[in-house]
Image (tube, rainbow, N blue to C red):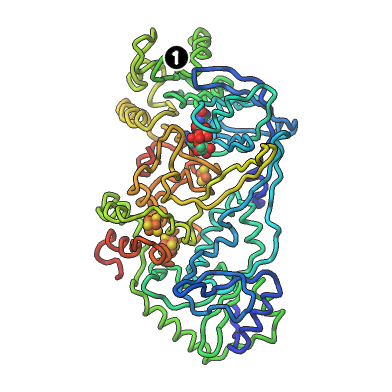
Amino acid sequence: MRYVKLPKEKVCEFLERLKSMGTLYGPKKISEKFYDFREIGDVKEVEFEYNRTITPPRKFFFPERETVFTFDTANVEIHETLPTGNRIIIFGVHACDIVGLRIMDSRFIDDLPDPYYQIRRENGIIIGLSCLPDEYCFCSVRRTDFVDAGFDLFLHLLPDGYLVRVGTVTGHKLIENSPEYFEEISSEDKDNFAKFETKRRSMFTVQGNWDDMRYRLELHLDHPMYMRESDKCLGCGNCTLTCPTCRCYEVKDLPTLDGAGGERVRFWDSCQFRSHGLVAGGHNFRPTKKDRFLNRYQCKNAYCETTTTAYCVGCGRCTYFCPADIQFKENLLEVYGPGGGA
Amino acid sequence: MSKPDPMKTYETHKCRLLRVYGLTEYEKLFLFRFDDPEIAQSWRFMPGQFVELSLLGHGEVPISICSSARRMGFFELCIRKAGRVTSEIHKLKPGDMVRIRGPYGNGFPMDRFYDRDLLLVAAGLGMAPLRSVFLYALDNRWLFGNITIINSSKLGKELLFAKELKAMKDIATAENIEIIQTATRDPDWGGLTGRAPTHLDKVNVDPKKCTAALCGPPRMYKSMFEQMIALGYDPRYIFVNLERRMKCGVGKCGHCNIGTATSWKYTCKDGPVFDYYDIISIPGLI
Ligand SMILES: Cc1cc2nc3c(=O)[nH]c(=O)nc-3n(C[C@H](O)[C@H](O)[C@H](O)COP(=O)(O)OP(=O)(O)OC[C@H]3O[C@@H](n4cnc5c(N)ncnc54)[C@H](O)[C@@H]3O)c2cc1C
Ligand code: SF4
Ligand code: SF4
Ligand code: FES
């Protein structure tokens, strides 16, 4: 891998450079407590030390709601509304969220690729950013706290700038086209990078790895945790809507008033909604709140072959944004039993 | 392998409804033809696969293809009036156009059925996908040994394709095909009664060299499995066609998900056909 240094005083200029290439998004503080990825107008608004954004980066490639085609009812014709292919740059993506995007890719760019997602993704540039965990993070045990792939550049914090890992040809070009912002790394930078990593690793509240979590869960499908916790659940769907790897969507036709045309839209759905498993005749494949709750715990702990990790990357959003204060990490540890790494 | 074309994933084709046949009070059989002659020539499917049928402005529904894979350019769908979209489909008249995408799903692995006896067991709407398997076997009769089809429903008048099967009876006997039609809860029904598993003694297939394809409610699978294993059917050759809520049909929208953390599946893409060993290793499949 190629490594370069981005000195602190060059960061804003580099962000300006990125902004000139397309639409730049990055983490911003949007309220007392919360951060979110937003379009960057003034590069000074970029928040470098944020814990987690409300919406996950998948929204840039798989938006909350989109029209897939418009239609002409009389002629039974459709007109696909494909993305425009504008360049988008997402700055400041944490390691777990980058693995999250690779998990999205494994499902949306498979042998039956989703054109809407794929076109946007091919036009996206991902700039990763190192972080220090808080008590909600458990990317450590998910093996997603340090990424090998899925970014064009990855910035690791140094006392006086960033050590930059170059992940793709697009990344190399970014460096080559702006040589004035970058330097060679020094041995001091290498030491500082190692120090940061050691500190980062020591801060996790869970250690080890949870690769066997899925078996533990499956052996205890009747664990009392599910009933107790799902009882508190409001079924609001925050946990899935904020999750970087949740992908469920619903589809609807919206005809125009005269019925002559209309559009077919798709929008994020949640397995925590009662309607998710409801079919004609009123039968529901997941009729109770507990069924739906259990479903999410199984789905998120399933194995993604592409990343060799669980579908859950341990970002902590589902707990951080849960209005009922349901603790995903703690609940999983409870079912795991002793030895879970806490 | 060349990269798959993303524009094919959700590609829909215009189809003309040619004919509608009433089957029962709630089910009709629809015969469609692709509008584009090139598509009509090239479109292929395997028994057990399904299409997504769009009525623009109303929505889209997954429906099993129930016709013979041999009839190029045409296909049949047996559709129950179950809700919003299917009620609109029932109002269609010959000449009307719809849009179709697919075929989707794995379908039955027909090559693994060759040179073996064939047992088909359908309950209710389960007859739709199994009719496609049955017609496939008839069209390729030399590839199969003895064949038995068990068609069951609650009431006699609800039996799907009952007349078609009855009309085949004479020729079927000459071709070593056993047709069993049974109504499970119908005091006025003159024919066989009792659930499908109770008729396993009337089949003309040899369990040791038979492939079985089942489609019906989960309850039926459980009792069929028990009896079939006891009678010596080979578990590797027992297949079921499952139903879940489906939207996309291509493993994206997540509605058809099943399984637990060690075996997470999308019914639309990993299925809808599963074998016996899938069923016993994936909790909640049936
Ligand atoms: C693989 C597969 C094969 C099928 N084959 C047939 C068939 O051959 N003949 C037939 O009559 N029916 C079949 N069905 C069931 C059929 O898809 C539903 O009856 C139909 O979707 C109901 O839609 P609706 O709008 O009329 O009902 P509503 O209750 O108004 O449903 C609204 C939406 O919910 C979804 N939905 C509702 N019920 C079902 C269901 N049972 N399965 C999946 N999605 C559902 C659909 O997306 C539908 O648009 C099949 C389902 C699947 C999954
Ligand atoms: S965020 Fe919390 S309350 Fe809302 S659906 Fe998820 S677990 Fe339930
Ligand atoms: S399940 Fe929760 S912790 Fe895991 S990736 Fe999703 S939001 Fe993050
Ligand atoms: S129907 Fe969308 S994932 Fe299976």
Left or right, residue A265 beside residue B265: right
Which residue sits furthest right? B37
The amino acid on which the numbered mark 1 sits, given as a three-letter code, is Lys
Please state which of residues A254 and B158 is positioned toward the viewer in this rendering: A254
Left or right, A169 with reference to B199: right
Of residues A299 and B167, which is closer to you in this image?
A: A299
Of all chains, the one bearing label 1 is: B
Counting from the top left corner in percent of width and height, residue B167 is at: 52, 9
- How many numbered circles are shown? 1
Q: Nearer the viewer, residue A332 or B95?
A: B95
User: Which residue is pictured at 37% across the width and 33% down the height?
Assistant: B218
Q: Position of residue A280 (x, y in %)?
A: 46, 34
* Mark 1, residue position: B157
Q: In which quarter of the view is residue A277 placed?
A: top left
**In this picture, residue A142 sits left or right of residue B12:** left
Residue at 44 percent across and 44 percent down: it is A275
Give the percent coordinates (x, y) of residue B174. Answer: 50, 9
Q: Can residue B201 be seen?
A: no
**Is the CB of the residue bearing disc 1 within 8 angstroms of ligand 1?**
no
Image quarter hosting the N terminus of chain A = bottom right
Within-10-Å neighbours for mark 1: few <14, some 14–19, many 20+ = some
Q: Quadrant of the C terminus of chain A?
A: bottom left
Q: Residue furthest front?
A: A257
Kind of element beneath mark 1: helix
- Residue B271 in the image: state x and y as whole percent: 48, 40
Is A230 above or below relative to B82? below
